[in-house]
């Protein structure tokens, strides 16, 4: 084979290999506390860890971890290695169980998020799931009674809500709104450049899931087809260079900005990564898994169950 053809052949092999590569990630467990579950049992730092759900945990871009303990009106700030750095008291925040939306017996899924640098935390309060307060590192409320749906931080310390159609600054002031139409059987997200990503779930008789990216003028950038048995699909997030991370069944796919390359991360087949696990991508490409630990004790009332409350970092990607 001529030398030039050999070079071209090797190049094509490398491109093909990269386009279908499986990302190599180092998985590290960060233990935040231990629990001993009996009726009324508590965990380390007096937090009932078995009642911590993924919306109660936030991570900044330095991998610091923030846990909302609404029972005692605190946020616990941990390092990326699980060392407790400080406790933030939220004295002027209302975490009552009474809900104007759900009634006295309604369950409220309180939420927390954090700015990229950890200088502000954001919690829902006032007996509502979508009523936000902005709090500084001393626990002082900066703003409150901000009516927004679930918020998601993006690189550059901007936030998005309403499936990405509304952009916010780090004080949750609205910067801009996008006029995006909704379509049946679609799931949508918008990145920091106003590119729109959609999942088209198709009909119930098809295993095909169509993933599409269009620019702000609605010109198609790429279109990809995936097989999905369960139709368990969702957006994980975006890193600082514009790669999109999406979850489909038991894998996370990483799409490059122009769609020319694709890699994947297989989710370990362990109990911690099943159920209502929340996945988050940090700006450097680190993936964080925040498990729902209620599954470890439900159905075992009266039995002593002990364990560790951990989250998991998948370090790799662009690190």
Image (tube, helix red, strand yellow):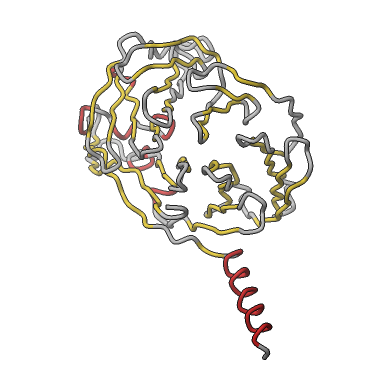
**Which percent across, then down, holds residue 212?**
71, 46
Pick whichever, 13 or 86, lies toward us: 13
Residue 20 vertical position relative to residue 105 in the rendered view, above or below: below
Can residue 279 be seen from the camera position used here?
Answer: no
* Residue at point 62%, 74% (across, down): 11
Pick whichever, 129 or 101, lies toward us: 129
* Residue at point 45%, 46% (across, down): 284
**Which percent across, then down, holds residue 20?**
59, 65
Residue 1 vertical position relative to residue 312 in the rendered view, above or below: below
Q: Tell whether 84 sits left or right of 218.
A: left
Count the labels in the image: 0
Q: Tell whether 41 sits left or right of 116.
A: left
Residue 208 vertical position relative to residue 217 in the rendered view, above or below: below
Pick whichever, 193 or 282, lies toward us: 193
- To which quarter of the image does residue 74 belong? top left
**Which percent across, then down, holds residue 250?**
52, 54
Quadrant (top left, top right, bottom left, bottom right) of the N terminus: bottom right
Can residue 158 be seen from the camera position used here?
Answer: yes
**Which percent across, then down, holds residue 301?**
30, 36
Q: Tell whether 135 sits left or right of 242.
A: left
Q: Residue furthest bottom?
A: 1
Q: Tell whether 239 sits left or right of 177.
A: left
- To which quarter of the image does residue 303 belong? top left
* Residue at point 49%, 12% (across, down): 103
* Residue at point 73%, 35% (across, down): 216
């Amino acid at each position: 084979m001529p030398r030039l053809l050999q070079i071209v052949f090797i190049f094509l092999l490398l491109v093909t290999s990269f386009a279908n590569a499986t990302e190599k990630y180092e998985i590290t467990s960060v233990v935040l506390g231990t629990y001993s579950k009996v009726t009324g049992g508590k965990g380390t730092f007096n937090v009932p860890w078995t009642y911590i759900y993924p919306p109660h945990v936030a991570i900044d871009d330095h991998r610091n971890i923030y846990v909302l303990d609404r029972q005692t009106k605190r946020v616990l700030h941990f390092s990326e290695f699980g060392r407790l750095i400080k406790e933030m008291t939220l004295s002027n925040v209302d975490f009552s169980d009474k809900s104007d939306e759900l009634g006295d017996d309604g369950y409220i899924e309180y939420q927390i998020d954090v700015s990229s640098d950890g200088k502000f935390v954001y919690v829902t309060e006032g007996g509502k799931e979508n009523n936000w307060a902005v709090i500084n590192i001393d626990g002082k409320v900066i703003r409150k009674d901000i009516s927004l749906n679930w918020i998601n931080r993006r690189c550059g310390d901007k936030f998005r809500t309403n499936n990405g159609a509304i952009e916010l600054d780090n004080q949750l002031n609205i910067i801009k709104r996008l006029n995006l139409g909704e379509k049946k059987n679609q799931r949508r997200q918008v990145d920091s450049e106003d590119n729109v990503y959609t999942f088209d779930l198709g009909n119930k008789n098809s295993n095909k899931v169509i993933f599409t990216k269009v620019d702000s003028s609605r010109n198609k950038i790429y279109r990809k087809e995936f097989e999905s048995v369960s139709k368990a699909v969702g957006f994980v997030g975006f890193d600082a260079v514009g790669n999109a991370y999406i979850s489909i069944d038991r894998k996370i796919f990483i799409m490059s900005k122009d769609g020319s390359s694709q890699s994947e991360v297989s989710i370990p087949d362990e109990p911690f990564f099943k159920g209502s696990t929340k996945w988050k991508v940090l700006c450097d490409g680190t993936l964080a898994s925040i498990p729902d630990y209620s599954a470890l004790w439900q159905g075992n009332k009266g039995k002593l169950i002990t364990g560790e409350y951990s989250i998991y970092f998948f370090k790799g990607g662009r690190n």
